[in-house]
Amino acid sequence: LLISFRQNIVANEFCNIDEYEETTKKCNVQLYYSQNRYILYDVNPAEGFNLRRDVYIRTAVFVKNIIKQEKSVKWHLILPPWGNLYHWRSKHIGFQTQLSWSLFFDIPSLQKYIPVIEMYQFLQEYPSENNETYLDVVYVLQNDEEMFKTGKFEDKNEIIKCNDKALQFYKVESEKYIGYFWGYHNITSKAIKCVKFHGTMSGLKQNLKSNAYRSIMFDHMEIPLHDFYGTIEYWKARRSMRYNSELYNIANEYRKSFLNSTNEHDKTERPDDWTKEKGRRNAIGGPYLSVHLRRHDFLVGRSSTVPTIASAAFQLKNKLDKLGLKFLFVATDATQEEFSELKQYLSDYMVLKFIPSDYILNKFKDGGVAIIDQIISSYARYFIGTQESTFTFRIQEDREIIGFPTKTTFNYLCKNAEKCNTNGQWKIVW
Ligand code: GFB
C-alpha cells in the first residue's frame, strides 16, 4: 500500500516543491503509520533562562493550536534540556548541562496544557537505528537582516540555501547531519533546511507537514513572536508552568523561618491544580518588601537604567518606611561586596537573601536557586523589580497569578531616586 501510494503521488497536495524530485519524478515524502508527531526546538545559546521560559509559552500555545486544528495525528512537544547557560556560573557543582525540566517545573502541570515529553523519554520511545535517533528535519530559523536594515517588516517563511560556514550542523553522509542537539551525540537529522523567518508562531504551521515528517525540530525558536501576547491562552500556558514542588517547599520553609510568612496568614493559598485556580486581587503577601536587584551584565548592558547600590538603598528605604515594613528580601546576582554595601546602607532593617545549602545547590543548580528567589519574591507584600529584566517579569507574572493588587507588583528601581518611565503592566487575563 505504501509503495503504490508513493508512486501515485506526484506533486500533489502532499508534495511541496522542495520535496519533489525531478530525477525520479516522485515525491520525496514518507508516510508514517504511527500517529505520533514530535516537535522539538532549541534557542539561541546566548539567551538566558527567563527568556527561554517565554519561548516555551510561545511554543506551547502554538502546539495547542496545532492540536486543535490537526486532529488526525497526535502532537507532542519535546522539552529541550537546560544547559550551558551563560549566567549559570557555580563551578564546583559540576556541569550544568542536559538538565531535565522536572528539576525546575512540575511536568504533570505542564501536561494539563499540552502533551509534553522530556528529551530522555523521547529518545526512549522514538524509533532509533543503530542506537542513533534520526530526526526527520531541522529548520534553522534566521532573521531577515534586510528587513532590519530597511525597517520594512513583513511576514516571511522562505527556505533559503544554507550558509554552510555559519551553520552549526554538518552533513556527514547522505541524509545524515550532526550538530549540537543539546549535547546528545546520538541525535542526528535526515535533513537541514534554513529558513528566513519573520512573523509569529502560527507561521510555522506550514513547515510541519505531518504527512511527511514525524519529528520536526526548529532551531532558534526565539525568532517567531507570540501570536497574541497576554491573552487568556498565553496566561493558561503560563499558569501551567508550576515549579517543582520541592522548590516551593524550600521557599515556603524560608518564608516561614525568616520572614514570618505563611500562605494562611498572607492570603496566598492556591489550589494544587492550576486549572482550578481563579482570578482574584485580594492576596496580602508576607510582611516583607522584596526587590530583584539585577547587577552583573546589566551594569554594562543596561547602565542607563540600573542604579548604584547607594541609590537603590535610598529607594528601598523610602518604600520600607512608607509601608511600615522592617524586612527586605533581596533576590540578586550581586557580588558579596555589593550585597554588604546594601546592608550597610540599610542597617536599620533586616536585609536578607536566600543562601542555598550545598545540598540544594548541588541538586537544583543555579536555575533552581534562581526559581527559589523568584518564589520568595513573588509572595512578598510589595515587589520592586529591575527594568527590562525577564527575571523580574517572571516574578511579576507569578504575583499576577497569585492575586496581588497590581500596584504592589509593577514597580521598578530607577536609575536615580526620581520617578522613572517604566515598562507597561502586563496584567493577567482569566
Ligand atoms: O534569566 P535571565 O535571562 O534574566 O538572566 P534577565 C539572568 C540570570 O542571572 C538568571 C541569574 O537566570 C540567573 O541565573 N540571576 C539574575 C539571578 N538575577 C538573579 C537573582 O536575583 N537571583 C538569582 N539566584 N539569580 C537577560 C540576559 O537577563 O538580559 C541576556 O539573560 C541579556 O543575556 C538580557 O543580557 C538583556 O532578563 O535579567
Image (tube, grey):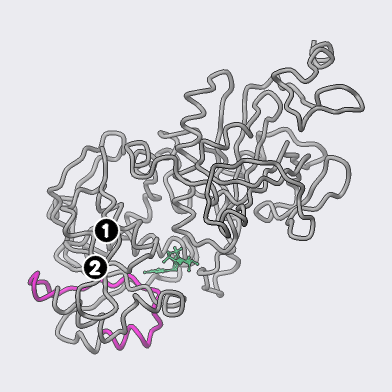
Asked if marks 1 and 2 touch (Cβ < 8 Å), the reply is yes
Give the quarter of the figure containing the C terminus: top left
Question: Left of 405 or right of it: where is 40?
Answer: right
Q: Is residue 408 above or below residue 77?
A: below
Please tell me which residue is depicted at 31% across the width and 80% down the height of the picture. 307
Q: Quick one: SS at disc 2?
A: strand
Quarter of the image where ligand 1 sits: bottom left
* Part of the protein shown in magenta: 320-342
| Residue 325 belongs to the span the image colors magenta | yes
Q: Which quadrant of the figure has residue 74?
A: top right
Residue that sits furthest to the right in the current view:
23
Residue 317, image x and y in percent? 16, 79
Of 378 and 365, the residue lying toward us: 378
Question: Left of 152 or right of it: where is 217?
Answer: right
Residue 254, image x and y in percent? 27, 65
Q: Which quadrant of the figure has residue 15?
A: top right
Question: Which amino acid type is marked by label 1?
Answer: Ser
Question: Which amino acid type is marked by label 2?
Answer: Ser
Please tell me which residue is depicted at 52% across the width and 56% down the height of the picture. 151
Q: How crowded is the residue under tag 1: few (<14 C-alpha within 10 Å), some, or many (20+)?
A: many
Give the quarter of the figure containing the N terminus: top right
Please name the residue that numbered disc 2 is placed on: 290
Q: Which mark is residue 378?
A: 1
Residue 410, image x and y in percent? 23, 60
Q: How crowded is the residue under tag 2: few (<14 C-alpha within 10 Å), some, or many (20+)?
A: many
